[in-house]
Each structure stands twice: as structure tokens, then as C-alpha cells.
């Protein structure tokens, strides 16, 4: 069931609405001013990439952008890529610490680990 974004032609408010069928869209009103003159917007598309796909696509020799280093999902990516290339299983302890680092990057320093 798609969630569409709309913009009101009267007050320029942008909002989202879950549209179950075409009839729902015909009766849609702006939540700000109640106007029915709405324009459907082209929304930004987002999709999920699995961690395995991220590892497969990661090139350790390529330079990375600043945003790469700000994304906590990339913590441990290099180690996982190298371990995969060498056929090494890093084990559940590595995964647990990695999850903690991704959630709170300073947590391991606080615990003295």
C-alpha cells in the first residue's frame, strides 16, 4: 500500500497520505486548510541494502567520502571484508562488539574493553 506525498496548491503544505485505493485519493483534503486542489509529489526512493551486499560492494582500496565515515553501519566493514576474503569467521563476540559500537561508538571505551 503506497504512501504518497502531496502539496496543497492553496497553502503549499506538504503532507503524506496512505492511499488504499483510487477512491481514497479523490476525497483527499489538505490537513492544513482543507483544500482539495492537491499535487502529488515525486518522493525520494529509499531501499534497504543488506550487510552482505554492503560488504560485497565495499572496495578497501577506494577513497571514501566523509559521509562514509559518519555512517555507523560502516564500522567494521573493512574487517568483515578482509575476513571474508581470507575465509575467516570472526565469531559472535566480534558481532556483539560491532553491534555495540554501531549503537554507541564510545561504549567500548567507557567499559575499558
Image: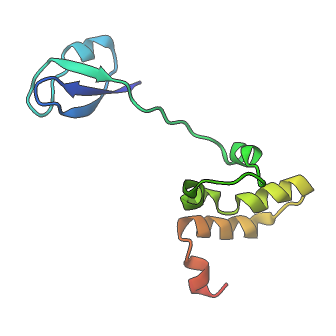
- Relative to the observer, which residue lies in front, 93 or 16? 16
- Relative to the observer, which residue lies in front, 93 or 84? 84
Identified at 85% across, 60% down, the residue is 89
Residue 92 horizontal/vertical position (percent): 75, 65
Identified at 23% across, 33% down, the residue is 14
Residue 103, above or below 74: below
Residue 66, above or below 48: below
Color scheme of the displayed model: rainbow
- Outermost residue on the left side: it is 33
Q: Is residue 75 left or right of residue 103?
A: right
Residue 19 horizontal/vertical position (percent): 32, 22
Residue 78 horizontal/vertical position (percent): 75, 59
Identified at 78% across, 54% down, the residue is 61
Residue 53, above or below 100: above
Displayed quadrant of residue 18:
top left
Point out the image quarter for the N terminus: top left
Residue 88 horizontal/vertical position (percent): 89, 60
Identified at 26% across, 17% down, the residue is 24
Displayed quadrant of residue 113:
bottom right
Amino acid at each position: 500500500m503506497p504512501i504518497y506525498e502531496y502539496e496543497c496548491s492553496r497553502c503549499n503544505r506538504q503532507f503524506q497520505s496512505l492511499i488504499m485505493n483510487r477512491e481514497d485519493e479523490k476525497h483527499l483534503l489538505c490537513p492544513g486548510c482543507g483544500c482539495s486542489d492537491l499535487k502529488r509529489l515525486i518522493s525520494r526512493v529509499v531501499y534497504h541494502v543488506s550487510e552482505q551486499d554492503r560488504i560485497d560492494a565495499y572496495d578497501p582500496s577506494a577513497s571514501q567520502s566523509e559521509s562514509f565515515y559518519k555512517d555507523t553501519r560502516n564500522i567494521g566493514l573493512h574487517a568483515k571484508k578482509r575476513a571474508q576474503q581470507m575465509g575467516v569467521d570472526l565469531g559472535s563476540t566480534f558481532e556483539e562488539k560491532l553491534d555495540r559500537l554501531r549503537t554507541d561508538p564510545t561504549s567500548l571505551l567507557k567499559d575499558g574493553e
